[in-house]
Amino acid sequence: MGQSANPRRLTDDSAMAKARMLRASPQKLNLVAQSIRGKSVERALNELEFSRKRIAKDVKKVLESAIANAENNHDLDIDALVVDQAFVGKNLVMKRYKPRARGRMGKILKPFAEITIVVREQEEAA
């Protein structure tokens, strides 16, 4: 009398990986996510490897995790994988204050973000 399994949110030819609490603003993280959308995973990994953005290392880890999920959990061919979706969300914002002149305080916001990467197996066009 166990609980029935939840249905899959993705199609059978796709896999997902998510990272939360990444120490970067969503706007900056979205610039990196934008650079890999729609590309093959091999090309996307190369793009992230040589990117000058600091957050690209964390995005590369998430992409490698999505590739591993596709291979191990869903038996997909890693040579035919494409980055189907890469979307960014907001997370918490740490608030800090810095003393300013005349007894005032300057607000410092330290935002966190999260990223979700979905890879899909692309059929070979004959």
Image (cartoon, rainbow, N blue to C red):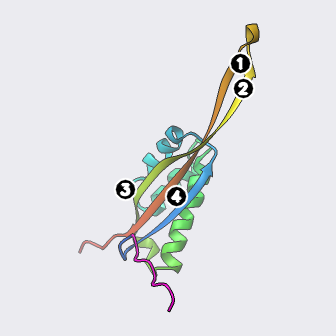
- Which residues, given as a range, are shown in magenta? 1-9
C-alpha separation, residue under disc 4 versus residue under disc 1: 43 Å
Residue 90 in the image: state x and y as whole percent: 52, 45
Q: CA distance from mark 2 to mark 4?
A: 38 Å
> Callout 2: 10 Å neighbours few (<14), some, many (20+)?
few
Q: Residue furthest left?
A: 126
- The x and y percentages for residue 84 are 38, 60
Mark 2 highlights which residue?
Answer: 97
Q: Does the magenta-highlighted stretch encompass residue 8?
A: yes
Q: On the image, numbered disc 4 is attached to which residue?
A: 45
Whole-angstrom CA distance, mark 1 to mark 3, is 44 Å
Q: Can you identify the residue that label 1 sits on?
A: 105
Neighbourhood count class around disc 4 (C-alpha, 10 Å): few under 14, some 14–19, many 20 upward: some
Ranked by sequence position, the earlier of labels 3 and 4 is: 3
Q: Main secondary structure of the magenta part?
A: loop
* Mark 1 or mark 3: whose residue is earlier in sequence: 3
The image quarter in which residue 124 lies: bottom left
